[in-house]
Image (cartoon, grey):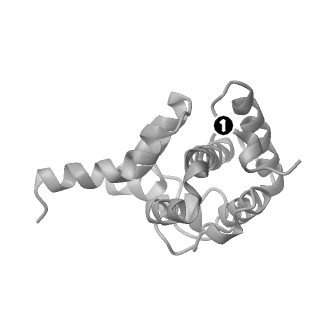
């Protein structure tokens, strides 16, 4: 069994990308929930005896778990593939079976150090927008195709670049 001391340092390692990235608090909060396994997906709601919506809201094919929703879902995989391709980071395309946090920590090792902070910001933005897309489908019945979501993520990244949160030129080709 891990001691509280060990758990503290493991948690610190996982959130280094969150602490160092300059993202709005709403995104930081969502990614904190993801890292700590408190993301309100259907499987989490069911484990806690709450009403849930069943299968994944993005693909309707698999149970909605945290890792499936953010990384493993067909919709999410297409979104990440296109976003990472656009950012010239095909080398870190996610494995659909990998846990999100594990993929993120492993991928940031593949990114050159000067680009890691922007990479972390892009990952947080991507995960946050996938979560927003899920919520749009569940609560408003609205949906975007994956390429439209990627375009929306790119537009948001441009806005973040203007206010100094994200360095657009480090990744995206115009």
Residue extending farthest to the right is 174
Q: Secondary structure at mark 1?
A: loop
Tally of numbered tags:
1
Q: Which quadrant: the N terminus?
A: bottom left
Q: Position of residue 19 (x, y in %)?
A: 42, 38
| Local crowd size for mark 1, using a 10 Å CA cut-off: few (<14), some (14–19), many (≥20) | many
Position above or below: 18 against 56: above
Position above or below: 6 against 107: above
Q: Position of residue 132 (x, y in %)?
A: 63, 42
Q: Residue at x 68, y 60 (%)?
A: 80
The reply to whether residue 158 is visible in this rendering is yes
Residue corresponding to mark 1? 166
Residues 16 and 114: in front is 114
Q: Residue at x 44, y 65 (%)?
A: 102
**Taking 87 as reference, is 69 left or right?**
left
Residues 126 and 64: in front is 126
Q: Position of residue 113 (x, y in %)?
A: 54, 54
The reply to whether residue 39 is visible in this rendering is no
Q: Position of residue 45 (x, y in %)?
A: 40, 51
Residue extending farthest to the top is 163
Q: Residue at x 69, y 24 (%)?
A: 163
Res 85 → quadrant: bottom right
**Taking 5 as reference, is 18 left or right?**
right
Q: Residue at x 55, y 45 (%)?
A: 117
């Amino acid at each position: 069994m891990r001691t509280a001391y060990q758990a503290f340092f493991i948690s610190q390692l996982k959130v280094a990308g969150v602490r160092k990235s300059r993202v709005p608090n709403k995104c930081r909060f969502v990614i904190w929930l993801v890292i700590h396994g408190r993301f309100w997906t259907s499987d989490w709601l069911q484990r806690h005896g709450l009403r849930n919506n069943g299968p994944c809201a993005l693909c309707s094919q698999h149970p909605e778990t945290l890792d499936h929703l953010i990384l493993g879902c067909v919709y999410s995989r297409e979104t990440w593939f296109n976003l990472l391709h656009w950012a010239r980071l095909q080398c870190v395309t996610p494995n659909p079976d990998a846990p999100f946090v594990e993929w993120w920590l492993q991928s940031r090792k593949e990114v050159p150090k000067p680009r890691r902070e922007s990479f972390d910001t892009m990952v947080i933005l991507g995960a946050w927008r996938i979560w927003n897309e899920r919520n749009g489908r569940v609560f408003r019945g609205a949906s975007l195709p994956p390429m439209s979501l990627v375009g929306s993520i790119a537009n948001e990244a441009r806005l973040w670049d203007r206010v100094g949160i994200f360095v657009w030129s480090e990744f995206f080709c115009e």
